[in-house]
Structures are given as structure tokens and as C-alpha cells.
Image (cartoon, helix red, strand yellow):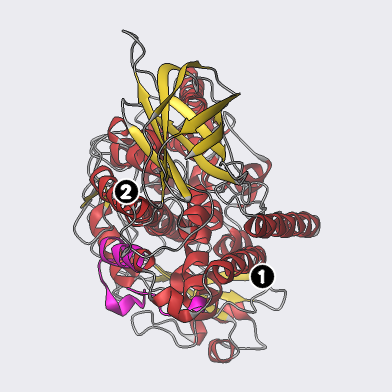
């Protein structure tokens, strides 16, 4: 009881203010106060001060409850509250981070900003309300099966079904739609949108390519057919996740020393290079048996499951030396070599790049970043209260992910969507491909240092994804470790945190489908295991997504470098391929233009950006966690400087893991 001084801040979003009436009540250890009217007519980007006399003895203040109601006969309008600050009768400051829209005639319970690991066994008023808050959240954030064998998703058919605080801001939505409309209009003006014919010449493809371009896409258009550039992309292209060291050739890839002698030269042979660790394999066996799309311009499309052998030469170039366009060797599946005719070898590489497009987009982009980030989001909101330190740590990295994923299920991978229109893996193939990718998933594959080691790529030179990514991983790990050690004082405190364990279990069951063989934990027993897990989550939702998303336009804008589909089956013999048969195999004109618009749209973050480490919403209100954030930001600035300096000497700059251009969350 006594005088409470209250300051309420309304956000700066364009429509953040409200004409509705706002009330507040105070929740303490003992009791909850009556609600007090704060008034109506709240302006955006404003702070309002109040002095409230509380008659009830509520004990120590733990949370506030905000209520919103209509004023007279006015319509309901949403209000964006940034924070509430309260000075209690003894002069103690309490800070309550809100940072959310309140859209209905409802109440929202806001716990104090101090990160707190609380027991669910207590009987005070706040604990009971906190339990009810989580129960209510589980009704809002419901799980739904997307497809058998795939991670669950939020139960929402469209963006209007999402919680209001998961939806894009008006600024982001507007810039996203405007960018797509402008790109589509530009190619339409060139008269290419409805042209269902094959390209007549490779040079003709430049007519669409000139609509949109970047310095790197220009370089790709010039070098796409060079063997050294083909190999380079496995390390620093848009999907540096597939290649691995090969110490023994697979039985179904019968490459002999004589086949590759022309590539290796006279001073060595295949067996020596295998033993020396200079041979690498890109195996697309996951595509075996995946049904191909039959609705791209009403034409049957084709998928291959190739195998590509690469060799690191004495100049540290990674070169393709053998390609088999299928998993079953034989007369109908020849092994193509650089010594074959120009068009035979070119078409073989194009088939590999098309397979790369399918696996990259479905497994390493959609599944490993978008779908897992959605799982992390839903589980976090279902299982962790707002004042849990893990909630506070993760919530900036989950921003807008449900919106972009819901859009993707509607317009990208849904029936009649982009995949059906332009991608070989259409509606009939994407779900079985996701299922196979889930069956192959391992925990180590989600943790950058372990993934690099498992693929034998610790020492391969000019691997910029590894170099830049490990710097970011270590910075994140240090940041997370500081936070974990601040809030958890022992392994026992990790084991006995019921909310944390419920969160991990929810992710394990709904996200990773309780697959024990994956090595993904269903519970966490130690502080180091928690640090590893949280680092993995944050890296997936930020840096990893940047690595496999932001370069899409650069590497796929020039269509022959990454065809979204192929119109003819892979060749079954050597010596029959011509430039015309290559053009007849590549996507049609309108398919190419649609693909260009899509990768342009998806490679660039819309407005309302928040780069990695930028936390304008102050969920942590204590001094020590804020110092950890500052330290993290300073380390990211150092990494950015190092990367920019390194890019000055790299043959081709690697731009995608500069912290300044990595988005905090998956929102595109």
C-alpha cells in the first residue's frame, strides 16, 4: 500500500497510439491491487507519468497488469506499449519491459524485467498468474503437423491467424510487398512473364539478367562455367553445407585413376590424393526417388541425384574431376569428366547445380533455418514466461519468423505456389524431401564447429564460411556463456529448472520428432550443454540463415548457375549433348524470370531491420546482462572489421557473415 509513481511509454511505430482507455493493476507476492484508470488518448512515441495510491498490501511488487478497453463508442484500436516503470513507496525502481501490441479488450500480465528462474511450486498470486499466462499462451501458440516426418508448425492458415505480436510491422509489410511488386513489374515490362518458350541462346538470358544485378552476380555470369568457380561455390556459395572430405570412394561411384589422370596430372594419382585428404565429395543421394514436378508450364520436370568428385589442386583450387548423374552406375549412367566434350561436361555440371538448388532450398534453407526457427519460437512462447532469462535471450532472434514462414506455406511451398510454378521439387516432392532430410539430421550438423569437423573441412583453404562463421559462433558462445553463468549457478540449477526442461522437451518432440539417433537432447543436464544448445539456436536463427539466404540472388540470378528445374531427363550417353539440347533442358523464359524475381525478393531484408546484436527492446533490465550485451556488440564490431579487411584480399568477397548485414532473426 502507498504511493506508486508510474511512467508508461508508448512506442514509436506509426500506429502505436490508441484512443482506448488504459488501466493498470499491481501484482505482488501477497496480492493483486484493484485496477486504476490511466486515461485514454495515447500518442505514439510518448511517455505519461502517474501517481497512484494503492490501498491493498500487495507485498513486494513483481508484475503489473495492463488493461485496455474502448472509450465510449469508439472502435477497438491496438496500442503498442514499450515499457512501464514504477517507483514503489520505499523508492525502489521496478522496470517492466512490454514491447508488444495490445489489440483487444483484454489484460496483459507483465513481469518485472529482472531475469528470474522461478519454481512452479510456489503459491503466491504472481506464480499462479504466471501459470495461467503460460496456459493461455499454449492456447494461442498451438502446434500443427505440417507434413508427416517434418517439424510441427504453428496452427495458423494465414498471417491473420497469427498472434498480433508475431506479425510484420506496417513498415516491413509495406516494403516487402512494394519490393515484390516493383520486381515483377520490371520483368513484365520486358514482355517475358508469359513467354513459355525455351531460351534461344545463352546470350538471350542476359535480357532478363540485366533487370537486376549485383557485382557478384555479374562475376557469376562470367565465370559460371569455369571448373574452379564451380568448386569455389561448394565452400563460399549460397550452400556451403554439403561438401565433405572423401577418404574412400563410395561403391556406387566407380571412378578410376585412369579416368581422372588428365585432371590430376602425372605427378600423382587418385589413390594418393584420397590418402592425402585432397579429394572431396558432393553426394545428392537424398534426391533419389523424390518425385519431380509436372506442373511447370504444364510440362514434366526432372530431378537427378548426382555424385560429384572434387580435387584440391596444388594451387588450392577446388576442381570437379568426375560427375555421375545418378546413384546407380552403369551404361545408362556414365561418369562425365572434364576431358569429355565441352557440352557433355557443361551439361553434367548444370545438372549438379540444379540438384544443388533443390537440396539447398529445401533442406539447408527451409528446414535447417526457417522451420527449426519456427519450432524454437512456438516452444519459447508456450513454455517460458516473459521474465525467464532464456526467453529474454532468445526473443529478439525469433522476431517475425512466424509471419514469414506462414507466408511461405501459403505462397512459396503451398499448392500452386512458387515451388509448384518453377521448382523441380514441387508439391509432390517437397514433403518427402523434408522427411528424408529430417531422418538424416544430426545435432552436430546444427553446430558449426562440429559440422565442419564431421565433414573433414577443418583445414581446407579459402573456406570463408568456416573462417567468418567460427568467429561469430565463438562470440555467440561467449555471450551465451556469460548469460548462463549469471543466472544458473550450477548444473543442478539447469537440471531442476522445470520451464527450461519443458522447453527443450517440447522442441525435441515437436521439432525433432523425438529422434534419438539424431543426438539432439530431450533434456539438458549441465551448464555447458545449455550454452551449446542456446548458441545453436541463436546461430540458426541469425548467422546460419544469412549464410544460406543472403547470397541467393548473387549465385542464382544467372540461371544456368542454378536452374530451379530441368525440362529434359539427364543424359544417358556421352557425345550426344549440344548447346541446343542444353537450352532445351534449362527452364523456360517465364520460369527463369519468376525465379529471378523470387531470389531478388528473398535475398534482401525488407525495412524494419535489426542487425545481429542490436537489441533496442531492452528485455534485460539489470546492469550485468546489459554489460554482456555491450561486450557482445563490441566483439561483433571487431569481427565485422576483420571480415571487411579480409575481403580486400580475397579473390571474391564473402559478404554474408558480416555481422552488420546479418539479421537478428529470420524475417525474410
| Label 1 environment density (alpha carbons within 10 Å; few <14, some 14–19, many ≥20) | some
Q: Is residue 559 left or right of residue 164?
A: right
Marks 1,2: beta carbons within 8 A: no
Question: Is residue 575 at all visible to an observer of this figure?
Answer: yes
Q: Mark 1 falls on what kind of element? A: loop
Residue at x 57%, y 54% (from the top left corner) = 225
Can you give x and y, in whole percent of width and height, for residue 284 in the image? 38, 67
Is residue 211 depicted above or below 575 in this figure? Answer: above
Furthest residue in direction top, as rendered = 73
Instruction: Residue under label 2, please give it.
Output: 129
Is residue 151 or residue 62 the one in the foreground? 62
Of circles 1 and 2, the one toward us is 2
The foreground one among 137 and 408 is: 137
Q: Position of residue 627 (x, y in %)?
A: 69, 57
Range drawn in magenta? 501-528
Count neighbours of disc 2 (C-alpha within 10 A) and say few if under 14, some if 14 to 19, many if 20 or more. Answer: some
- Circle count: 2
Disc 1 marks which residue? 317
The residue lying at 53 percent from left, 70 percent from top is: 448
Residue 568, position in %: x, y? Answer: 31, 49
**Precedes in sequence: disc 1 or disc 2:** 2
Q: CA distance from mark 1 to mark 2?
A: 62 Å
Amino acid at each position: 500500500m502507498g504511493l506508486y509513481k508510474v511512467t508508461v511509454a508508448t512506442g514509436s511505430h506509426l500506429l502505436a497510439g490508441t484512443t482506448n482507455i488504459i488501466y493498470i493493476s499491481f501484482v505482488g507476492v501477497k496480492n493483486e491491487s484493484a485496477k486504476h484508470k490511466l486515461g485514454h488518448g495515447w500518442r505514439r512515441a510518448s511517455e505519461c507519468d502517474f501517481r497512484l495510491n494503492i490501498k491493498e498490501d500487495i507485498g513486494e511488487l513483481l508484475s503489473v497488469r495492463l488493461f485496455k478497453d474502448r472509450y465510449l463508442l469508439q472502435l477497438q484500436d491496438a496500442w503498442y506499449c514499450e515499457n512501464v516503470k514504477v517507483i514503489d513507496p520505499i523508492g525502489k525502481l521496478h522496470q517492466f519491459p512490454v514491447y508488444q501490441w495490445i489489440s483487444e479488450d483484454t489484460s496483459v500480465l507483465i513481469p518485472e524485467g529482472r531475469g528470474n528462474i522461478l519454481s512452479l511450486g510456489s503459491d503466491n498470486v504472481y506464480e499462479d498468474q504466471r501459470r495461467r499466462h503460460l496456459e493461455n499462451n499454449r492456447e494461442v501458440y498451438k502446434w500443427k503437423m505440417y507434413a508427416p516426418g517434418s517439424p510441427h508448425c504453428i496452427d495458423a492458415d494465414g498471417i491473420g491467424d497469427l498472434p498480433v505480436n508475431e506479425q510484420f510491422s506496417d513498415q516491413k509489410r509495406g516494403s516487402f510487398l512494394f519490393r515484390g511488386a516493383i520486381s515483377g513489374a520490371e520483368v513484365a515490362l520486358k514482355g517475358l512473364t508469359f513467354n513459355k518458350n525455351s531460351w534461344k541462346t545463352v546470350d538471350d538470358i542476359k535480357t532478363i539478367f540485366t533487370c537486376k544485378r549485383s557485382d557478384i552476380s555479374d562475376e557469376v555470369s562470367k565465370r559460371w562455367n569455369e571448373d574452379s568457380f564451380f568448386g569455389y561455390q561448394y565452400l563460399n556459395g549460397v550452400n556451403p553445407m554439403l561438401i565433405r572430405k572423401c577418404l574412400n570412394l563410395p561403391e556406387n561411384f566407380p571412378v578410376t585413376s585412369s579416368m581422372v589422370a588428365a585432371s590430376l596430372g602425372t605427378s600423382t594419382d587418385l589413390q594418393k590424393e584420397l590418402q592425402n585428404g585432397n579429394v572431396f565429395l558432393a553426394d545428392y543421394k537424398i534426391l533419389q526417388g523424390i518425385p519431380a514436378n509436372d506442373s511447370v508450364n504444364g510440362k514434366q520436370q526432372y530431378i537427378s541425384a548426382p555424385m560429384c568428385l572434387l580435387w584440391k589442386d596444388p594451387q588450392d583450387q577446388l576442381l570437379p574431376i568426375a560427375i555421375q548423374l545418378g546413384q546407380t552406375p552403369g551404361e545408362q549412367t556414365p561418369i562425365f569428366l572434364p576431358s569429355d566434350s565441352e557440352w557433355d561436361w557443361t551439361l553434367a555440371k548444370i545438372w549438379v547445380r540444379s540438384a544443388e538448388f533443390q537440396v539447398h532450398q529445401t533442406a539447408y534453407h527451409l528446414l535447417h533455418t526457417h522451420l527449426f526457427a519456427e519450432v524454437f519460437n512456438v516452444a519459447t512462447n508456450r513454455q517460458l514466461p516473459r521474465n525467464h532469462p532464456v526467453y529474454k535471450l532468445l526473443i529478439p532472434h525469433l522476431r517475425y519468423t512466424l509471419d514469414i514462414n506462414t507466408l511461405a506455406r501459403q505462397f512459396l511451398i503451398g499448392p500452386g505456389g512458387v515451388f509448384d510454378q518453377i521448382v523441380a521439387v514441387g508439391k509432390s516432392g517437397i514433403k518427402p524431401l523434408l522427411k528424408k532430410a529430417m531422418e538424416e539430421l544430426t545435432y552436430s550438423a546444427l553446430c558449426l564447429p562440429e559440422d565442419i569437423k564431421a565433414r573433414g573441412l577443418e583445414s581446407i583453404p579459402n573456406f570463408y564460411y568456416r573462417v567468418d562463421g567460427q568467429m561469430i559462433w565463438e562470440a555467440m558462445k561467449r555471450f551465451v556463456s556469460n548469460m548462463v553463468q549469471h543466472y544458473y549457478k550450477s548444473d543442478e540449477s539447469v537440471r531442476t529448472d522445470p520451464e527450461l526442461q519443458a522447453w527443450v522437451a517440447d522442441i525435441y518432440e515437436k521439432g525433432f520428432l523425438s529422434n534419438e539417433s539424431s543426438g539432439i537432447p530431450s533434456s539438458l543436464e549441465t551448464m555447458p550443454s545449455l550454452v551449446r544448445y542456446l548458441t545453436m539456436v541463436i546461430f540458426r536463427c541469425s548467422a546460419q540463415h544469412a549464410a544460406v539466404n543472403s547470397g541467393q540472388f548473387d549465385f542464382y540470378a544467372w540461371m544456368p548457375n542454378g536452374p530451379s528445374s530441368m525440362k529434359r531427363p539427364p543424359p544417358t550417353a556421352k557425345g550426344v549433348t549440344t548447346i541446343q539440347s542444353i537450352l532445351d533442358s534449362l527452364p523456360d523464359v517465364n520460369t527463369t524470370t519468376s525465379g529471378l524475381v523470387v531470389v531478388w525478393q528473398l535475398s534482401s531484408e525488407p525495412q524494419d531491420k535489426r542487425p545481429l546484436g542490436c537489441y533496442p527492446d531492452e528485455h534485460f533490465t539489470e546492469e550485468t546482462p546489459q554489460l554482456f550485451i555491450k561486450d557482445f556488440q563490441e566483439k561483433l564490431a571487431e569481427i565485422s572489421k576483420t571480415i571487411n579487411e579480409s575481403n580486400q584480399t580475397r579473390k571474391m568477397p564473402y559478404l554474408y557473415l558480416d555481422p552488420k548485414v546479418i539479421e537478428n532473426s529470420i524475417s525474410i
